[in-house]
Image (cartoon, rainbow, N blue to C red):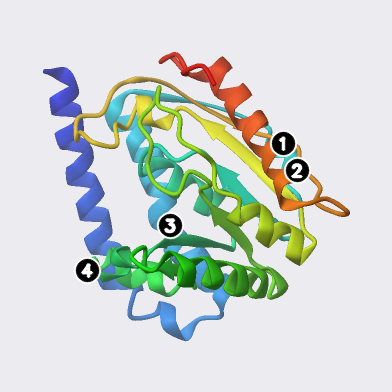
Amino acid sequence: MINVVRSLVFYIGYFSAMLIIGVLFLPIAPFLPLAARYRLLNLYNYFLIMWFKVACGVRYDIQGRENIPDEPCVIQANHQCEWETVFLQVMKPPVCTVLKQELLRIPLFGWGLRLLRPISLDRSKPARAMKQVLTQGVARLGAGLSVLIFPEGTRVDPGIRKRYNKSGSVVACRAGVAVLPVAHNAGERWPGRHWVKRPGVLRVRIGAPIQTSGRTPDEVLVDVEAWIEGQLQEISDIPRPAV
């Protein structure tokens, strides 16, 4: 019952902050340079990370911040819930996220997201979506933004393993930038398919950049998947399935 009460309190703050940010900052954001726009709209993400910790009894164990490069890169992480999409926005801004286009239609949230130059995909047209990721991803990196791509393609519950997609590695190789791998167990604290949050330790591991120069996307993907899955074996409370 305590987790239900904590979750209710959390969502009161969650939606209240979204409304306040939406009303006060969204009208201003379009007129700001991109970097300033990120700083302004990321205030909501910073609040959400803090509020989740306070309201739901979560402790953060984040290691590897020293591995984050100064230059743009392709960030690849496992995808379990909403929390990591928030954290990865503030981990290395400005970052362009590859996401499904339906998210941009959500009132306030989607409107703000649209201002951050995401790559929105129509999943019903996979060939077109892949071309869009490659073209726009390389362009965003060239403009000084990092690109966030979840190689699993969709949310995957803790304890489940899904085949990794190589689109992120292809973008990194074409742009000549490194891949920054990130592993976390956020879905154990913030279940992707249930609104009740769970207290405990939320662990994040940020790996050393994986270089792409002179390598194929398949070779890079092998390293990305091996690193993320190896870290998940260590930080997950729910056992990982055998390969």
Q: Quadrant of the N terminus?
A: top left
Give the structural element (helix, strand or loop) at label 3.
helix
* Residue 74 lies in quadrant: bottom right
Whichever of callouts 3 and 4 sits on the residue coming sooner in the sequence is 3
Q: CA distance from mark 3 to mark 1?
A: 34 Å
The residue under label 4 is 107
Q: Is residue 155 above or below residue 5?
A: below
Q: Nearer the viewer, mark 3 or mark 1?
A: 1
Determine the secondary structure under disc 4. loop
Q: On screen, 239 above or below 149?
A: above
Q: Quadrant of the C terminus?
A: top right
Describe the element under mark 2 as helix, strand or loop: helix
Label 3 amino acid?
A: Leu
Q: Nearer the viewer, residue 22 or 240?
A: 240
Q: Amino acid at mark 4?
A: Pro
Using the rendered view, name the quadrant where residue 238 is placed: top left
Q: Residue at x 46, y 86 (%)?
A: 31
Q: Disc 3 vs disc 4: which is toward the camera?
A: 4
CB contact under 8 Å: marks 3 and 1: no
Label 4 vs label 2, nearer the camera: 2
Q: Residue 151's spot in the image, x, y percent?
A: 53, 46
Residue on which disc 1 sits = 223
Q: Which residue is mark 3?
A: 43
Q: Amino acid at mark 2?
A: Glu
First in sequence: mark 4 vs mark 1: 4
Badge 2 vs badge 3, beta-carbon distance below 8 Å = no
Does residue 239 appear anywhere in the picture? yes
Per the model, the C-alpha gap separating discs 4 and 2 is 40 Å
Q: Circle 1 sits in a helix, a strand or a loop, which is it?
A: helix
Which residue is label 2 attached to?
219
